[in-house]
Amino acid sequence: MKRKIFRKDLLFLLPIFIFLLLWEISGCIAQTPLFPPFSKVVTEFWFLLGNGILLKNLGASLARVLVGYTLGCLAGLVVGVLMGLNKVVERSLSPLIGILFPIPTLGWLPLLMLWIGINEALPVTLIFICAFFPVAYNTLTGIKGVSEEYIKAARTLKASSWFILRHVMLPMALPNIFTGLRLEAGMVWRTVIAAEMFAISTGIGSLLINAESLIRVDVIMVCLVLLSLMCTGFERIFLWLEYKTTGAWR
Amino acid sequence: MTFISLRNVTTLYSLENVSLDIAEGELIVLLGFTGAGKSTLLNVVAGLTEYQGEVYFNQQNMNGIPTERRDVGYLLQDIYLFPHLNTFDNIAFGLRANSCPADEITEKVEAILALLHIGHLKKRYPKDLSGGEKQRVGLARSLVMEPKILLLDEPLASLDPATARNIRKEFKALHNRLNLTTLYVTHDFTEARELADRIVVIINGELKQSGSAQDIFCQPAPEIQEFIAAAN
């Protein structure tokens, strides 16, 4: 059994290994700073890690993502729940959300640059917008998806409306809520990078754009690998949380 | 002694001037075609639907009193166990909603699990329960609240005949033991005959006849004859 699992893991790693090998060989043959071999990227990664540049910029991006994402998710959750519980709120907000939701997050960038200015609030606001709409929409869908019969059953068990919301509606809406959280977990990283590339002087996006102007492809590649890890990592965290909270009963 | 009294109950689409007195501990089976208004009558008693007329429990007028304060246990047709809670937590739901202390919850839930012989299911989620097991858990969830009135809406409709027969027997024994005032909806004559202290036939929202199984099946009112013939 153990041997089988080990073989499966190897099979999963094999394409990555082949990709890195081909990258290394091609980079060595090309002999140009525009296409450095994998080993050069690894060396640069250790160098940037050692002198603190990578951690400083990653920390700046991570802080923006965490603040914007948390606020956006909380606001989305509250608005989604209110819309799901109250038809008047739903009817009032639905058209507005219907108009604003389809706007790509980066479309807000020029407007927000003028309104907010170029400061820390800019990427945080962009991430907030990025997270807010899908979480609100998915929470609404989840809450409305809870059959009225479950509410009836809970009421005959003498549960108050607040208890029903906390112990029936929200848990049953969790799969939908997690879909919203997971979809945007990777997207917020793409958004923060774009904002930093255009407007902010710290963060991975800023490091990327500076490396481009200095023709440091190795640094660009370090940043891209790191971004891939962060996007995947964030999505995986929510996948894990979803499994932990809903896996047993779904 | 009359425990539930319905006076001229009328609802928007289903019931028409229904009046009915139910004695304490009596098991009433509501019989009728699908759409006759049987489930609506249960909803009226539970306070889950709007109605005109009066509903009394123990001579107290229940009009305007919400479901959560009516002291009724209601087993809905599709049971609606909460999918995110295991058997223990489903049964404990109502107790927790009413701020019952944790040790009392454990004691009461364990007792009802033993009473219905479902102790082995307590960690299972609804998705892992069979139809019969779900019925028992649903019944346990209602009974653990120690309601004065029990409402059951076609609880055995989706079960195979053998399982339904077993649960029916268990339920009858349980009813005799707990002496609960019960309203039981079905359109199955065998079920009605086996369970009822009294059968009430509802046709097109109107109460057409009320009596023992013998009265209903041996001396049916003219409309009931048609109903029995159609059902056979």
Image (cartoon, rainbow, N blue to C red):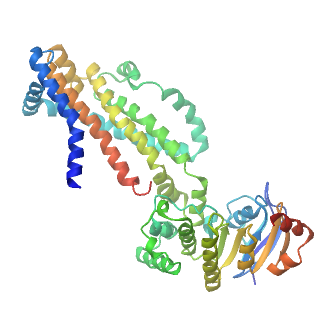
Quadrant, the C terminus of chain A: bottom left
Q: Residue at x 64, y 64 (%)?
A: B67
Above or below, B33 against B108 in this view is above
Residue A135 on image: x %, y %: 44, 39
Quadrant hosting residue A31 = top left
Q: Residue furthest right?
A: B222
The residue drawn where x is 47% and y is 58% is: A167
Relative side of A107 to A195, left or right: right
The image shows residue B125 at horizontal and vertical percentages of: 45, 62
The answer, for residue A37, to whether it is visible in the render is no
B117 relative to A155, above or below: below
The spot of residue B182 in percent (x, y) is: 68, 75
Q: How many marks?
A: 0
Q: Residue at x 85, y 79 (%)?
A: B215
Name the image quarter holding residue B209.
bottom right
Foreground residue, B165 or A84?
A: B165
**Quarter of the image where one finds residue A64:** top left
Residue B191 visible from this viewpoint: yes
- Image quarter (top left, top right, bottom left or bottom right) of the N terminus of chain A: bottom left
Judging depth in this view, the residue of B12 and B128 nearest the camera is: B128
x, y (%) of residue B76? 63, 64
Q: Nearer the viewer, residue A111 or A168?
A: A168
Vertical placement of B153 versus B58: above or below?
Answer: above
Nearer to me, B59 or B49 = B49
Decide if residue A64 is on the left or right side of residue B223: left
Residue B38 in the figure: left or right of residue B67 = right
